[in-house]
Image: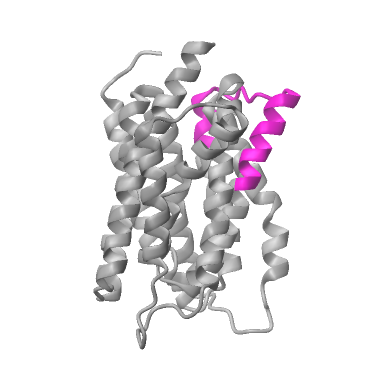
Amino acid sequence: MRKSSNWLKFVLIHVLFMGVWGALIEIPEKNGFPATLGYVVWSLTMIPAAIVGLLKMKGKLEVDKRSIFYGSLVGFLGSVGQLILFLALQKAPAYLVFPILSLTPVVTILLAVVFLKERTGILGWIAIGIAIIAIFLLSYQQPGSEGPSGYLWLVLTIIPLLAWGIQGFVMRFANESMKAESIFFYMMLSSIILTPAALYMTDFSQPINWSFNGPYLAAGIQILNAFGALCLVYAFRYGKAIIIAPMTTALSPVLTVLISLAIYAVIPHTLIIIGMLAAIISAFLMGIEETKMDERAQRKQ
């Protein structure tokens, strides 16, 4: 397919949408709208984005068994990660959670090295080492600080980190035989299927904010995620992965952290700031290495 300058437009929209989404995602919950219902709203906002994708491919959805299996598995992993993310943000602010989540390529590459016997270069191992250091730094708790207490927030954050890392690993297989729009459609379908679980987890005996700054604000924020993800699909279609992967992996968390810190009006401990920078550097290096691994795999085919 012909490359064009459109890739940069899609990358910028993706970074803007995902960066703002990450910083604002916890606000509806703080306004009294449960995180579990926030998941339900998110799943519904995936529908219009999936419809746009179907229109782009003229309704030619791939429905063979392989496509349904891989597409559903990718969607399930993404949806589980999303559901747990809402719970993680109940325990810790976005400026701590999202730098860790930016390390999902670390999980993807480690799985490829272990199970597919793919090789990662020195750059990849350096990124993995920096990522481990970053997680330890980000989990630092200053005595008497107002930061998150305990380590439950870290455990909850690591669950979507693993889920989305495995999702990236599965996408390697899915992209060999499927169109990106079909993958996105099954992601939407899986997110809808999991909504009963989110509803079951909701405590409806507690007061729920049904006003504008509850579900409606949540919808406005979650639609950024849905169309941001769709823009990423088209960015990879029109541009070079070796440029797009590190840009999107690193820049979105940067924007999330900056906006989140501005909202909270806080300056984290020096060790936590170093951890944020380490996570972003690791994500950038890992994005480059992941793309190199994809190129090597394609040359072998």
Q: In the rendered image, which quarter contains the N terminus?
A: top left
Q: Main secondary structure of the magenta part?
A: helix
In this view, 188 is above or below 142: above
User: Could you say which quadrant of the image residue 237 lies in?
Assistant: top left
What's the magenta region? 51-77
Residue 68 point in image, percent of width and height: 70, 31
Q: Nearer the viewer, residue 123 or 220?
A: 123
Residue 158 point in image, percent of width and height: 53, 58
Q: Nearer the viewer, residue 62 or 213?
A: 62
Residue at horizontal 66 percent and vertical 50 percent from the top: 192
Q: Residue furthest bottom?
A: 144
Residue 66 point in image, percent of width and height: 71, 25
In this view, 152 is above or below 167: below
User: Could you say which quadrant of the image residue 195 lies in?
Assistant: bottom right
Does the rendering let one see residue 16? no
Residue at horizontal 68 percent and vertical 78 percent from the top: 204
Residue 61 inside the magenta-drawn segment: yes
Does the rendering let one see residue 124? yes
